[in-house]
Image: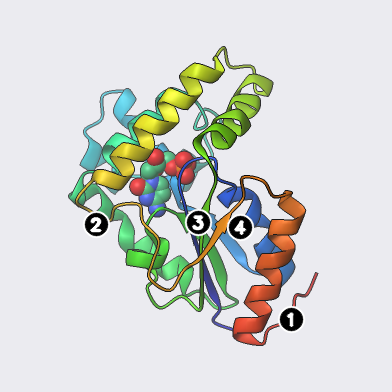
Amino acid sequence: MRLTIAIDGPAAAGKGTLSRALAEAFGLAHLDTGLIYRAAGRRTLDGTPALEAAQSLTAADLEADDLRTPDVARAASVVAAIPDVRAALVDFQRAFARRQGGAVLDGRDIGTVICPEAEVKFFVTASDDVRAERRFIELRDGGHDVTLGQVLADLRERDARDSARAAAPLKPAEDAVVLDTSGMDINAVVAAAIALVTDRTGIAPVA
Ligand code: DC
C-alpha cells in the first residue's frame, strides 16, 4: 500500500495527536517533521552553523530528550526559514512519505511541498488562545517554568515567522481538508479524519 497522509498546521493545533491516531488506525509509519527542524535548531544553540546542523543530523539527534523546550522551538522556526536548510531535509522526508506500507507526516509544508501528491491532506488549526492553553499545560506538566502569556506570545511569533517566510511557508494546500479543533473533542476530530480517509481512499482502518 502506498498511502500518504499529509497533516499541516500551526503550533499546538493538534497535528501530533491526530497524526499518531491516524497512523495507528491505518497501520502507517509516522514522521513528526517538526522534530527534524527542532533537532537542527537544537544544534545551532550549541554554535553549529544551521546548514551544517541540518546536513549532519543523525537518528540519535531526533531522539534527544530536550527537543520540546520553548528555546528549541524558536531555534527550529529560525533555521526552518533558511532555504538551504529546508532543501537539505527534503529527500529524507520524501523517501519516508513513499515508503512501502504508507506513512503519515505532519509539519508545515507536507501537503504543499514535501508530498503534493499525498492521497489525503489535512490542515489542522485552532484559535490562538486554545493552542496557547494546550501548549502551556504540556510545558507546565513537563516541568517548564512558563506563563500562559509567554506561551501565547511565543506561538504567535513562531506562526508569524513560519507563515511569512519565502521558502515553503505554512499554508493549507489547495486540496487540504481544514479541521478547526478549537471547540472539538480530540476523539471527534480523530473519528472525522478516519472517516474521511476511508471515504477518499476506500481503505478501512485496521485498528
Ligand atoms: O511542529 P513543531 O512545532 O515541532 O515545529 C517546530 C518548527 O519547525 C516550526 O515552528 C517550524 C518548523 N517546521 C517547518 O518549518 N516545517 C515542517 N515541516 C515542520 C516544522
Q: CA distance from mark 3 to mark 1?
A: 21 Å
For disc 2, the neighbor class at 10 Å (few under 14, some 14 to 19, many from 20) is: few
CB atoms at circles 4 and 3 under 8 Å apart? yes
Q: Residue at x 68, y 22 (%)?
A: 141
The residue type indicated by label 2 comes to: Ala
Does 98 appear above or below 20? Answer: below
Please name the residue that numbered disc 2 is placed on. 87
Per the rendering, the mark at residue 106 is 3
Q: Nearer the viewer, mark 2 or mark 1?
A: 1
Secondary-structure class at tag 4: helix
Q: CA distance from mark 4 to mark 3?
A: 7 Å
Q: CA distance from mark 4 to mark 2?
A: 24 Å
Q: Residue at x 61, y 85 (%)?
A: 201
Q: Position of residue 27 (x, y in %)?
A: 70, 70
Sequence-wise first label, 2 or 3: 2
Using the image as rendered, state which of residue 106 and residue 96 is in the foreground.
106
Q: Position of residue 43 (x, y in %)?
A: 34, 31
The residue type indicated by label 1 comes to: Ala
Q: Residue at x 65, y 26 (%)?
A: 137
What is the quadrant of the C terminus in the image? bottom right
Sequence-wise first label, 4 or 2: 4
Please name the residue that numbered disc 4 is placed on. 19
Residue 58 appears in view: no
Does 128 appear above or below 204? Answer: above
Please name the residue that numbered disc 1 is placed on. 204
Sequence-wise first label, 3 or 1: 3
Answer with left or right where residue 200 lies relative to residue 43.
right
Does 111 appear above or below 36? Answer: below
The residue type indicated by label 4 comes to: Ser
Q: Position of residue 107 (x, y in %)?
A: 45, 53
Residue 124 appears in view: yes
Q: CA distance from mark 2 to mark 1?
A: 35 Å
